[in-house]
Amino acid sequence: MKFPLLPGLLLISSVAAAQVVSHRDRVYTADQISNTVSVIDPMDNKLLGQIILGKPQPDLLSALYKGQALVHGLGASSDHKLLAVVSVGSNNVTFIETATNVIKGSVYVGRAPHEATFRPDGKEAWITVRGEDYLSVIDVATMRETRRVPVPNGPGQIAFSPDGKRAFVCSSFSPELAVVDVATYKVIKKVPVVSPFSPNIFPTKDGQQIWFTHKDVGKVSVLDTKTLTISGVLTTGPVTNHVATVDVAAGKLAYVTVGGEDVVKVYSRAPGFKQLATIPVGANPHGIWPSGDGSRMYVGLENGDSAVAISTASNRVLAKIKVGQAPMALMYVPNAVPAGAATNTGLGRQLVDQPAVVRTLKPPTAGPATGTMTLRSEGLVDLATFALRGLTPNTDYDIFLTSGTKAPYARDYALTTVRTDAKGGAMGQALGPVQRIAGGELNPAGKKFSRVIVAPKTTDGEPALLAE
């Protein structure tokens, strides 16, 4: 087998919504493997550079004394002057001035924070601390944590009502959506939902609906903010990541990234929630955000190390832009740079020129199992990331390279072992000179390993998945 190199949420104001795409705007992606924030000028759909917040893997696998790890979440202030960047691995929120790309402050919070959301008045940034059971409230002026708001375990993300009186908090570990009274910082209602894993939430501009995803079961729920009840549950597809809403000439719409199908799906927000379009975009679409005027939707490709721009008029991809490794959250910030200069001040480049190659893992015979392997060069070593679905639940699987051509395949070089969850899904990583091993360069006999195999750990029989 030859291996090539393998919002917090911002409520857009009426002024920003009227602003056409310009050089004053910026698109940001939070790049979890390269530990960067990629900065795009949407007028040209051009990468200006990256704000480097930490070292890439594997350089951060020892004690972390400086920099951030697992850059993941994004939030922007309502005046568009400040960007909050959440790093899951270093428990940090970094505040960046959008006009200059300068870091203005850094706040450490609890275990595994996920996303940042500024209150509409801009005075506080609320952080979902997903490894805990609370929200961290940061005073923006002093850049200090001032209080913690207890919520159901594993808060995922926050959306505020337009008047700033209520906060809606989805959960990554509890099957409920919490409604918080902002004045008292107290939960006033818990709304039961269809699954315990809701990582993303997005409000409509008029504040009448809250859309949020259920990644584990491939669904999206819609909350009616007047009645605080669920008005609809949409079956969207495997690995439903993020959702964004937009008002355009064609109507009031919602765009959903479906990572397991490599598409963005478009829905009407009118009763019935009819699906209107399916847009192929590339490997594992994750973050999504509309431009200020609603004419475009920007999408980050987690396994493609790219962002794409979609026309909301035609629902077609307009451009593809290379960004850092494993973009997660994505935000479009209108008027982020009032001067409009396409400057690279404060920007660098880190692993942005290394391609990611995605291989599909298929069952040897027809069946529900499926998966992907993403291989990225990290300098002297490679990072292989695996996402598997449809396997036997609660079962250990070995992932390995083999020189064999038929089952039972020799387990020539072990990559990793994963255990599936109750639904038959699993994720795993392997770090090492994978390409050099596969190509035979590190084998004294020059032997190549032509296949990647996923097989039950306890048997040498037919593999569950393979890729050549």
Image (spheres, grey):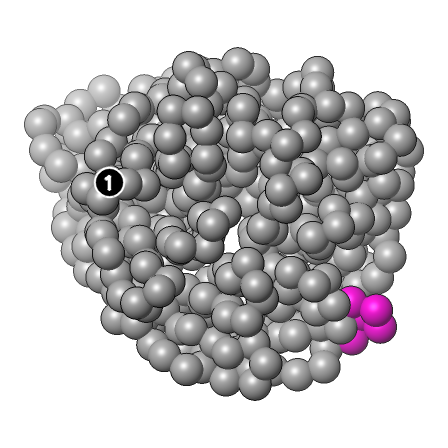
Q: Residue at x 46, y 63 (%)?
A: 156
Q: Residue at x 40, y 78 (%)?
A: 152
Q: Is residue 100 above or below residue 171?
A: above
Q: Residue at x 33, y 31 (%)?
A: 265
Kind of residue at badge 1: Phe
Membership of 422 in magenta stretch:
no
Q: Residue at x 64, y 64 (%)?
A: 119
Could you tell me if residue 300 is visible in this image? Answer: no
Residue 180 in the image: state x and y as whole percent.
Answer: 48, 76
Which span of residues is magenta-colored?
140-144
Could you tell me if residue 124 is visible in this image? Answer: yes
Quarter of the figure with residue 276: top left
Q: Is residue 109 above or below residue 451?
A: below
For the N terminus, the quadrant is top left
For the C terminus, the quadrant is top left
Q: Is residue 2 left or right of residue 333?
A: left
Residue 439 in the image: state x and y as whole percent.
Answer: 48, 20
Membership of 143 in magenta stretch:
yes
Q: Is residue 152 left or right of residue 326?
A: left
Residue at the extreme left: 366
Q: Is residue 346 left or right of residue 301?
A: right
Near-viewer residue (293 or 126): 293
